[in-house]
């Protein structure tokens, strides 16, 4: 009786010790999520119209079907998207493997053999056939498997966010390439229009020279202006071809699919992004990925700490044993067994402690990267807003100047044809009109680019998934 009571007491102490070490350590005092201002410092007054959800397909704000098509083609057809998608799928598979570690395992086995003893007439042989099932389960009393699953789950979400970041970058690159193409086409169109005007002026000068109203000097000046403008076309045409190559390469499409149709530079409506709060930065793909990396790092620390505690395992087997394969049906004997085990690390030279310290250092590095990513995202957004405001003011002023220069050019050519002004005035007004309109086209392209960069800074261009990580990260 005393021996049985001692065994029961020992079993009870073992169960209590296992229960005590089964509770995984809780991370106390985690800092709050990163704080961002409710309002952008660069704004003096709110705009109107946009919502954070609308940023997922921000290219629709331009009202340019071709821009939207090429942006989405780049997101879908780029090898960078395929590589990021494969990394995400790999992380999902690792997450499923970590989840499977929490479940029992079951395996089937079969064996057959023969044994020969003795020699000569005393030689005897025996056969044995066995079929069975083996089950094994390691209860996650130390929390290690749960921590591993949490880390794998956070990492899978981080890879999904990284895929989103690739999509954001591709959308921006494709949109900027499309705007560059339209800007080059606009400049080529302006050069052709200016060239047509200069050739008309050259004809008028030739008529006036025949009538004795103009000199050969004026005719040569007009010819020089025409030749100088013609010289701009070959370089512009080459730049248009190269821009089409860039857009096709980004989208993974043949060059011929990029039409050279002289469409205008896309223009986004004013104020579309200005009502979006600065807190929207938390949905940026790179910020989300960095945040999830911190969550995964916290879980790895818990996993490393769990390896220093006791682990418990349960195993068992059941099967049939017979002398022949045919006897497994009726003459087989039932065999089975049950095994429980416990393991507690006692001495490892400090290896487990070192692993914990290593994971803690990795966690601190992830937190630092997250803080840097949030700060960079905030100031990138502020810079984009400042640039956008400056581009708007510049485009407005240049449009006024171009309208005046175009009117002055028309008046000068009309008066020159009537003999009221000299030819030098015509040349100066033509140059001024060309420069002013060229500046307007460039400003419009810059304004479109600034809108694209602002939408990218706000985290647009991907579809965020619900955040399920339970670990908060530091500001």
Image (cartoon, rainbow, N blue to C red):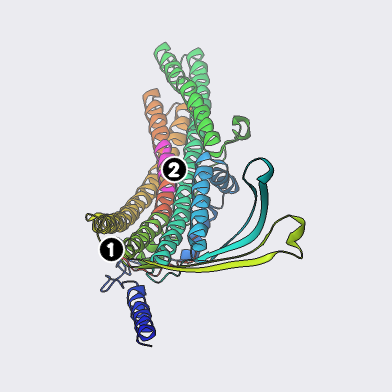
Q: Quadrant of the N terminus?
A: bottom left
Q: Is residue 396 left or right of residue 329?
A: left
Instruction: Give residue 445's mark.
Output: 2
Q: Is residue 49 visible?
A: no
Q: Quadrant of residue 13?
A: bottom left
Spatial separation of the CA atoms under disc 1 and disc 2 = 25 Å
Please give the range of residues in magenta. 437-448
Mark 1 / mark 2, whichever is N-terminal: 1
Residue 34 visible from this viewpoint = yes
Chief secondary structure of the magenta portion: helix
Magenta span includes 411 = no
User: In the rendered structure, are the residues bearing label 1 and label 2 in contact, judged by CB atoms less than 8 Å apart?
Assistant: no
Number of the label disc, if any, that sits on residue 41? 1
Classify mark 1: helix, strand or loop. Answer: loop
Measuring 53% from the left and 24% from the top, which residue is drawn there? 200
Q: Residue furthest front?
A: 121
> Which residue is pictured at 51% across the width and 56% down the height?
92
Residue 345, given in percent of the width and then of the height, sits at: 30, 62
Q: Residue at x 33, y 50 (%)?
A: 387
> For the view shown, which residue lies furthest in the bottom direction?
1
**Residue 162, above or below 137:** above
Dot 2 falls on a residue whose secondary structure is helix
């Amino acid at each position: 009786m005393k021996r049985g009571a001692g065994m029961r007491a020992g079993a009870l102490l073992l169960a209590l010790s296992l229960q005590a070490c089964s509770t995984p350590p809780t991370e106390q005092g985690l800092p709050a999520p990163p704080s961002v201002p409710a309002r952008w410092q660069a704004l003096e007054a709110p705009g109107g119209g946009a919502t954070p959800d609308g940023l997922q397909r921000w290219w629709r704000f331009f009202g340019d079907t071709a821009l939207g098509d090429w942006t989405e083609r780049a997101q879908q057809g780029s090898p960078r998207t395929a590589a990021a998608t494969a990394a995400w799928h790999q992380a999902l598979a690792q997450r499923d493997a970590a989840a499977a570690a929490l479940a029992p395992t079951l395996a089937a086995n079969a064996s057959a053999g023969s044994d020969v003893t003795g020699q000569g007439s005393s030689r005897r042989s025996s056969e044995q056939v066995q079929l069975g099932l083996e089950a094994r389960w390691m209860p996650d009393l130390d929390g290690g498997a749960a921590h591993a699953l949490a880390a794998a789950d956070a990492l899978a979400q981080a890879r999904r966010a990284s895929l989103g970041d690739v999509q954001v970058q591709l959308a921006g690159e494709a949109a900027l390439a499309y705007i560059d193409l339209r800007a080059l086409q606009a400049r080529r169109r302006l050069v052709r229009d200016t060239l047509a005007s200069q050739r008309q002026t050259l004809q008028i000068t030739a008529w006036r020279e025949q009538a004795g109203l103009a000199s050969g000097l004026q005719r040569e000046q007009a010819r020089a202006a025409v030749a100088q403008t013609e010289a701009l076309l070959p370089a512009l045409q080459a730049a248009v071809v190269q821009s089409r190559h860039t857009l096709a390469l980004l989208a993974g499409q043949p060059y011929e699919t990029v039409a050279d149709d002289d469409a205008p530079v896309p223009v986004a409506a004013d104020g579309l992004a200005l009502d979006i709060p600065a807190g929207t930065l938390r949905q940026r793909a790179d910020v989300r990925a960095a945040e999830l990396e911190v969550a995964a790092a916290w879980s790895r620390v818990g996993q490393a700490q769990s390896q220093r505690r006791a682990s418990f395992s349960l195993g068992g087997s059941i099967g049939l044993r017979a002398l022949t394969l045919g006897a497994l049906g009726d003459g087989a004997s039932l065999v089975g067994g049950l095994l429980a085990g416990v393991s507690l690390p006692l001495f490892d030279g400090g290896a487990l402690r070192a692993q914990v310290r290593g994971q803690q250092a990795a966690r601190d590095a992830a937190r630092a990267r997250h803080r840097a990513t949030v700060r960079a995202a905030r100031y990138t957004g502020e810079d984009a807003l400042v640039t956008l405001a400056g581009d708007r003011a510049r485009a407005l002023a240049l449009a006024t100047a171009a309208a005046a220069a175009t009117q002055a050019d028309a008046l000068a050519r009309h008066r020159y044809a009537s003999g009221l002004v000299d030819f030098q005035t015509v040349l100066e007004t033509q140059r001024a009109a060309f420069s002013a309109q060229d500046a307007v086209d460039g400003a419009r392209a810059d304004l479109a680019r600034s809108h694209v960069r602002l939408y990218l800074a706000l985290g647009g261009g991907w579809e965020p998934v619900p955040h399920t990580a339970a670990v908060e990260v530091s500001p």
